[in-house]
Amino acid sequence: MSNFARYAELLNVDCNTCNSACCRENTVIGLYPQEAQLLREKGTELIPYASDEQPEVYEACQAVRSDYILGTDCAFLGENADGQSICTIFGKPNRPFICKDFPPACYACIIRREQFGVNEPHTIARFCDLEQSKY
Ligand code: SF4
Ligand code: SF4
């Protein structure tokens, strides 16, 4: 079992009950050009994420995969039979790479869940304890 899978169990992190906290307005998301186009065509507002630090590194990254802030919830969100928000292109090949590769209970997931109010109490502190206990 991976570290994140273990954290998910211990911290009760479940994608099926968090209402897609990581797909909501104000999330930072890294997208390849065709993925950004896909989200925009569906109606998602993407705001380029600018950085003044190490502009040459930033520029090189922008040439391939760019960071954006979601200006709206992702337009690919829909609802399942239980009324939970879910990704309507889950499992489809055109789903953005970052969405396919985003492990539940990673740091960014825990923070988004906290901002969205779906973590159990003290989850961030417990996450930090788990991380630090690895060393
Ligand atoms: S990765 Fe984390 S924030 Fe995203 S849907 Fe799953 S539990 Fe929620
Ligand atoms: S494509 Fe799906 S997983 Fe990715 S941000 Fe949009 S709703 Fe979330």
Image (cartoon, rainbow, N blue to C red):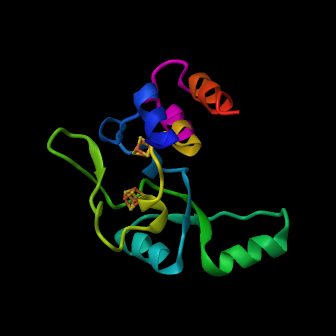
What residue is at 48 percent from the left and 54 percent from the top? 102
Foreground of the two, 50 or 120: 120
Position of 40 with respect to 32 (left or right) is: left
Quarter placement of the C terminus: top right
User: Residue 108, how many percent across, how many down?
Assistant: 57, 44
User: Residue 89, how many percent across, how many down?
Assistant: 29, 64
- Quarter of the rendering containing residue 100: bottom left
User: Residue 122, how many percent across, how many down?
Assistant: 55, 19
Foreground of the two, 6 or 103: 6
Is 118 colored magenta in this rendering? Answer: yes
Range of residues picked out in magenta: 111-123
User: How many callouts does the rendering have?
Assistant: 0
Vertical arrangement, residue 52 with respect to residue 64, above or below: above
Task: Name the quadrant where ligand 1 sits.
Answer: top left
Residue pushed farthest top? 121
- Quarter of the rendering containing residue 107: top right
Vertical arrangement, residue 135 with respect to residue 45, above or below: above
Position of 69 with respect to 7 (left or right) is: right
Vertical arrangement, residue 38 with respect to residue 44, above or below: below
What residue is at 21 percent from the left and 40 percent from the top? 83
Foreground of the two, 106 or 57: 106
Quarter placement of the N terminus: top left
Position of 37 with respect to 91 (left or right) is: right
What residue is at 85 percent from the left and 67 percent from the top? 54
Is 107 colored magenta in this rendering? Answer: no
